[in-house]
Amino acid sequence: MSQSTDKVSWSTTLAFGAPAIGAGYMYLILALYVMKFSTDVLLIAPAVMGAIFSLSRIWDAISDPLAGYLSDRTTFRLGRRRTWILASCIPISIGFYAVFAPPFSMQGADLTLWMTIAIVGFYSAMTLFFVPHMALGAELSVDYHERSRLFGVRHIFYTLGSILSLGAMYLLINEEFAEGGNVRLMAREQALVAIAIMVVLVIYAVVMLRERPEFQNRQQGGPLQAFTDIWGNPHAKLLIIVTFIEYVGSAAIAALTLYISQYVVGAPAMAPLIILAYMIPSTVFVPLWIPLSKRFGKIRVWMFGMILTGLSFGGMFSLPFIDSVEQRLFWIIVLAAFAGLAAGCGGTLGPSVQGDVIDYDEYKTGERKEGSYFAAWNFVHKSALGVMLLLTGFVLDFAGFMPNVEQTMQVKIAMVSLYGLFPLVCYTVGAILFSRFSLDEKAYEVIRTELDARRAKAAEEADATAQ
């Protein structure tokens, strides 16, 4: 199929994006709320929770590559991607429910062990969904810009799910401060609703989507060889380094937003509004980035998005030095809106660029191993979050953080340093490194022409053999 005609119908695009609603809900509420839920409701020390998240990242070093490799090598009738997407429903449901439903009587070491198993189990289960799902998106089209549209729609759905989680989080926060509130019971009930929605959307996607037969059974080596190929791919190596730096910066945002809104801004109930100010531009302006990427190139536009994100969060370092709650709230909402605008750029163009890098691998090796590639990027994403949560836990403990009380200026400065200055440095360094990325549209056209010629030749040989 030639690049110029490799378009994807809207029905397929919507089916591909739909499960991201459930995934976005689950991932964001864990990233934003489970740390605070654990420290302020379950009363587990921040450093302990940081260590739990760090342990889950160590396990990811095994589970992510294994999931990618198995997805690439699967030969079931349902397909190598849809099989794993469907199979992920059960462990995702169990893991997500366990995170928000520890037994009421459980305390101390037993509670810590429960949360460790639940968090590690949930992230492992989400790997079974995310890796095949992202890999399937890269396979649905080989068109340089059509991929941006596919992943742009997915980003919209993912953000919509994230916005829904804000409503749930708003109810949880209010319940936390309400007289006689039962946060743990509400969290259980919300988890059951989220699980039901996720399962329905996954089944819908599996029924509606189809996989490309010419991409099946194209990965020949073992998992070690697959990741040797990835690290030997110069475009993939640079992208892995850049995305790790970028994800570390964004992980600071995920880990600290609730703490910032309560202990720095002084408006804990406004946390969902702050995050909503980030999410809405991230969704609404996705259609802006696609034509801009066609005009200026995906690489340049994504670099601009990185810089804008860094500057937006860098401005939040000033929050503790602003006098009134109203002024602090206004400032953080404005900066969050600009950061969200830029985040939509990365969510749209990042996976599209990753798909181009996978085609370069096929150009060099003759194999299709999208699963292994997206497993590598998924591991980088989760590793960055684990590193940041570990750092956040120890920094808060070292600075003297005490839950549910007024914080000292030392603690507030520690928080905004992680929340503002750290992302600014990370995104700036990432943009500088990404300026060296050379797989632009012109270079991709050369690769695509060669791959299309190989595919046409293989089809001719197959027809000749059949005759």
Image: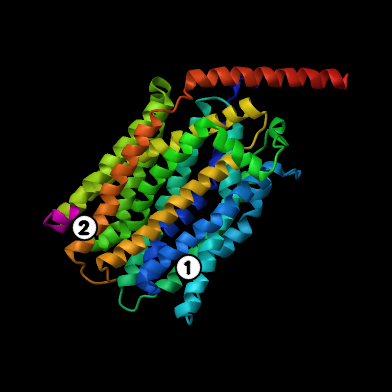
The numbered disc on residue 282 is none
At horizontal 58% and vertical 44% (from top left) the residue drawn is: 133
Local SS, label 1: helix
Mark 2 neighbour density, 10 Å: few (under 14) some (14–19) many (20 or more): some
Q: Answer with mark 2 or mark 1, whichever residue precedes in sequence.
A: 1
Q: Is residue 334 left or right of residue 361?
A: left
The residue identified by callout 1 is 100
At horizontal 32% and vertical 60% (from top left) the residue drawn is: 258
User: Which is nearer the eye, 225 or 202?
Assistant: 225
Is residue 81 something one can see in this rendering? no
Is residue 16 something one can see in this rendering? yes
Q: Tell me residue 347's x, y (percent).
A: 43, 39
Give amino acid for label 2: Ile
The residue identified by callout 2 is 413
Say above or below: 259 vs 104.
above
Q: Tell me residue 248's x, y (percent).
A: 39, 48
Q: Quadrant of residue 180?
A: bottom left
Give amino acid for label 1: Phe
Distance (Cα) linking label 2 and label 1: 31 Å
Q: Tell me residue 214's x, y (percent).
A: 71, 30
Say above or below: 171 vs 185.
above
Magenta region: which residues? 319-325
Residue sitting at the far right: 467
At horizontal 40% and vertical 51% (from top left) the residue drawn is: 163
Residue contact between numbered discs 2 and 1, judged by CB atoms under 8 Å: no
